[in-house]
């Protein structure tokens, strides 16, 4: 279990005090359940806490490794760098287990994204499970695509189950073995 210290919680809460910063996270799309500004703030704050928890797990200082700069900016496609590897951190709440690439973004965009690995970290606020990882190429080869209406996920959403993801060390080993 990764427990975030109050300093990181404060950084995440301060990060979402700027409206331009919060809205810049939803430039390409906004999930329907985030229908108020307060829900958007909570979502973005939790995403920043997830990045911090993932950084901590990887032995990085989250104060330095996570981008806490406010403003109208998009990330370059990744959230963290570990020994030159670019990692895009995705999070979900306890009880959910899917690494999701949203239909609104489109799976066809992923090959052009500046990232090497996707990470899924499950938790909320100050308590997080250790993240699991998959190389971008492996996600592209092995994801499942939602094809039918009526699911909780939108048609066109790509996903992998947490059980199909690996520890950082194993994800790196697989990357080198198969690339």
Image: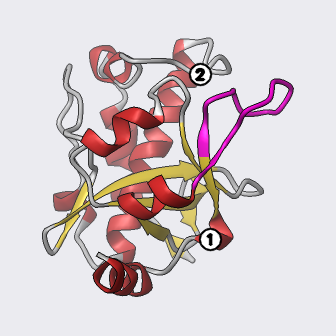
Q: Residue 99, image x and y in percent? A: 57, 53
**Label 1 crowd bin: few (<14), some (14–19), many (20+), radius 10 Å:** some
Where disc 1 sits, the SS reads helix
Whether residue 5 appears in this view of the structure is no
For residue 139, side relative to residue 32 (left or right): left
Side of 69 relative to 15 (left or right): left
Residue of label 2: 31
Instruction: Tell me the distance, in whole angstroms, between the alpha carbons under discs 2 and 1.
Output: 25 Å
Q: Does residue 67 sit above or below 1 in this rendering?
A: above
Q: Earlier in the sequence, mark 2 or mark 1?
A: 2
Q: Secondary structure at mark 2?
A: loop
Residue found at the far right of this picture = 150
Say which of 86 and 144 sits in front.
144
Span colored in magenta:
143-158
Residue 150 in the magenta stretch? The answer is: yes
147 left or right of 6 in image: right
What residue do we see at 59% from left, 12% from top? 36
Q: Main secondary structure of the magenta part?
A: loop
Q: Is residue 126 above or below residue 23?
A: below
- Residue at x 24% of width, y 73% of height: 60
Residue at numbered disc 1: 164
Residue ID at (26%, 42%): 113
Q: Which residue occupies 22% across, 43% down?
A: 68
The spot of residue 82 in percent (x, y) is 21, 71
Q: Eyeballing the image, is 136 above or below 151?
A: below
The crowding category of the residue bearing disc 2, from other C-alpha atoms within 10 Å (few below 14, some 14 to 19, many at least 20), is few
Left or right: 86 in relation to 156: left
Taking the magenta stretch, the answer to whether it contains residue 41 is no
């Amino acid at each position: 279990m990764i427990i975030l210290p109050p300093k990181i919680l404060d950084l995440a809460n301060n990060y979402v005090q700027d409206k331009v910063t919060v809205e810049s996270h939803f430039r390409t799309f906004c999930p329907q359940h985030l229908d108020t500004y307060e829900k958007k703030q909570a979502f973005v704050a939790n995403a920043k806490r997830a990045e911090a928890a993932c950084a901590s797990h990887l032995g990085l200082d989250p104060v330095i490794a996570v981008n806490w700069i406010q403003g109208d900016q998009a990330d370059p496609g990744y959230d963290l760098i570990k020994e030159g590897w670019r990692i895009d951190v995705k999070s979900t709440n306890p009880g959910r287990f899917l690494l999701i690439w949203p239909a609104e973004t489109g799976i066809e965009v992923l090959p052009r994204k500046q990232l090497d690995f996707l990470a899924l970290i499950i938790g909320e606020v100050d308590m997080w499970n250790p993240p699991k990882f998959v190389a971008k190429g492996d996600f592209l080869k092995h994801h499942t695509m939602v094809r039918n209406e009526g699911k909780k996920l939108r048609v066109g959403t790509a996903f992998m189950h947490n059980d199909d993801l690996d520890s950082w060390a194993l994800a790196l080993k697989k990357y080198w073995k198969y690339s």
